[in-house]
Structure formats: C-alpha cells, structure tokens
Image: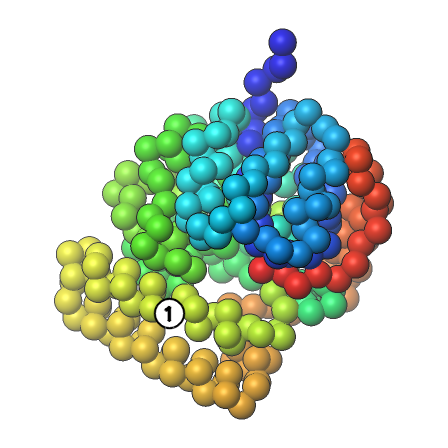
C-alpha cells in the first residue's frame, strides 16, 4: 500500500526547455521527503515533455493531453488530483530552496489559523544568477488595497491547505492575474501568512520582461472594475484603474524602445542582494544542480522559460 503524501507539489509547464530539470532537482533536494510531484504539460512543443517523461520515481506523475488550456485551468487540475494535505505552487523555470517545504509545512502546523503561507523570493537574472530580493516588505497582515494594487504575494511561493484550495479554485477568466483575483474574491474568508526568509529562487530575466508584464494589465483592470467598487469604493477603484492604465502605457513605451531593464531600475519593490547573500544563494543553487533525478541525467542547459 502506497503511503499518502503530506505535500503535493504541482508544476504546470509550457515550453520551459531544460530549465524544468533544475526545478525538478530542487524538489528532489527537499529536506522534507514526504511529497508527491504532479507535472502537468500545457501543450509544450519543446524538449521539456521528453525530459519529464524519463523520470522514474513513484512519487512523480506526468499528465499530458496535448492541449493548451492556460495556467488557471492547469492549477485547478492539480488541486483536483492532489493527495497531500498541503499543496505547493511552483513554476517550471524556478528553483526551490531545499528547506522550503519543511519550513512551510512546520509553519502551517504551528499556525493553524493560516490558510496559506508565502515567502519573499530571490530573483534570478537572464544568466540564472541571483541578483535581487523581492517581497521583503510583505505585510504580516493582508490589506485589501495592497492586494488590488500589487497582488501582495509571489504566487509560486505559496503552500496552501488542500481543504482551502478545494473550496477556492482559480477563475480561468483572468490570465496572468489569476492569483490576485482568487485572493481578492476570497479576502473575507482567507488568512494569508508570511515567512520572512526567502525560500524560492524566481526566474525573472530582463529579456522580454516588458512583453511579459504587459500581458497581465488587461486582467488587472478587469479585476479592479469587478471587485473594486464594492470592496474599496468607487474613488479608490478609479484611482487604481487609472494607475494600471498609466503603468501599462509606460511599459508599452519601454517595450517599444527595448528598455526592459528600466522595470527593475525604477521599481521600489526590489532590494539588491549583498555580495555575501549572492554567494550563499549561488552555493545553494549549485548544490541543487548536482541532485540526482531517477531516470534522467543532470546535464543542464539554458531553456526558453515561461
């Protein structure tokens, strides 16, 4: 009889290239070993599907239907299939800190009133080098205006109680902002908690950044108009909608002049890592790259990301 896992780690993927191997290696590097991994393909046509299908471990499930249904659909699919008491999000081109799952599980066990826990992230640049910290200014208590404005959490860092997820699915109507819509919609019945330590390495290459960011603004404004008037008032709704429109116009300009780097330079959300912090992060990532994954080798190449 196969033991029921405590944690389900879900990775939806669409053409991440060989970067998906590092994501999987970071799962196998976890100090918490009572997990299952669900890999859901969303219609990839690169080498990523071939890579994951080579894995030989009973804890790993690969789902393929050959269709491109979008991230929210795939996230709901993972929720429905999960056997763990907790569900961990992760993107296919990111890397988890080896102690992420252990620390998040222990946190939720101690803090029973929390529905989910998130953490700051260390941002990886185009060369997969750690450069910035994002999320050090997270508030311990959620503020609805902040969720409307910034989304408040880095989505791939969350560990969620499965029972909460079962009752609160993602909407497929808000691509690139499905997490913000979910947490605004469930604001009154959800407690979001934070661990101050960064437990995730988030791939945030400058190349193509403006194009990626622009995709989220239509959904952002759709969310503001749908939920804003009732939850934050008409005046605040108008201010946020106008702010979103102006930001998207500015990002469009940056896209036209090919200055993706300005998004990071002008943002107050990113903190530069010290040389010591960079050294520690690089050592951790390099250790993960030597982790063996049953059935596949450890030859890592640069991929396209998602």
Q: Going 66% across and 27% down the picture, which residue do you hit?
A: 59
Q: Position of residue 283 (x, y in %)?
A: 81, 53
Q: Quadrant of residue 161?
A: top left
Q: Is residue 235 left or right of residue 124?
A: left
Q: Quadrant of residue 124?
A: bottom right
**In what element is the residue under mark 1?**
helix
- Of the pair 179 and 122, the residue shown nearer to us: 179
Q: Position of residue 211 (x, y in %)?
A: 50, 74
Which residue does the numbered mark 1 point to in the structure image? 217
Q: Going 28% across and 60% down the picture, which residue do you hit?
A: 223
Count of marks overlaid on the render: 1
Q: Can residue 265 be seen in the rendering of this structure?
A: no
Q: Is residue 253 above or below residue 171?
A: below
Q: Is residue 96 left or right of residue 137?
A: right
The residue at the far top in this view is 1
Q: Is residue 149 left or right of residue 18?
A: left
- Of the pair 102 and 211, the residue shown nearer to us: 211
Q: Can residue 83 be seen in the rendering of this structure?
A: yes
Q: Quadrant of the N terminus?
A: top right
Q: Position of residue 53 (x, y in %)?
A: 69, 39
């Amino acid at each position: 009889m196969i033991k029921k896992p405590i944690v389900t780690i879900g990775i939806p993927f669409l053409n991440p290239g060989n970067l998906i191997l590092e994501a999987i290696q970071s799962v196998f590097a976890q100090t918490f070993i009572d997990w299952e991994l669900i890999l859901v393909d969303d219609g990839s046509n690169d080498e990523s599907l071939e890579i994951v299908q080579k894995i030989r471990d009973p804890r790993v499930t690969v789902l393929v239907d050959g269709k491109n249904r979008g991230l929210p659909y795939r996230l709901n699919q993972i929720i429905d299939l999960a056997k763990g008491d907790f569900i961990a999000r992760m993107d296919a081109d990111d890397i988890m800190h080896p102690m992420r799952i252990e620390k998040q599980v222990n946190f939720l066990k101690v803090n029973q009133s929390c529905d989910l826990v998130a953490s700051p992230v260390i941002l990886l640049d185009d060369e997969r080098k750690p450069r910035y910290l994002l999320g050090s200014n997270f508030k311990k208590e959620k503020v609805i205006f902040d969720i409307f404005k910034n989304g408040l959490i880095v989505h791939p860092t969350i560990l969620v109680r499965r029972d909460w997820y079962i009752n609160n699915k993602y909407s497929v109507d808000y691509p690139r902002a499905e997490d913000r819509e979910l947490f605004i919609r469930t604001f009154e019945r959800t407690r979001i908690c934070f661990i101050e330590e960064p437990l995730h390495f988030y791939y945030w290459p400058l190349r193509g950044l403006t194009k990626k960011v622009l995709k989220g603004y239509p959904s952002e404004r759709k969310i503001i108009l749908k939920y804003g008037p009732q939850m934050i008032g008409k005046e605040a709704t108008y201010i946020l909608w106008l702010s979103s429109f102006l930001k998207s116009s500015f990002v469009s300009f940056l896209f036209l002049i090919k200055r993706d780097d300005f998004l990071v330079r002008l943002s107050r959300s990113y903190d530069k890592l010290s040389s010591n912090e960079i050294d520690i992060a690089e050592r951790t990532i390099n250790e993960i790259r030597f982790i063996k994954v049953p059935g596949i080798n450890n030859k890592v190449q640069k991929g396209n990301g998602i």
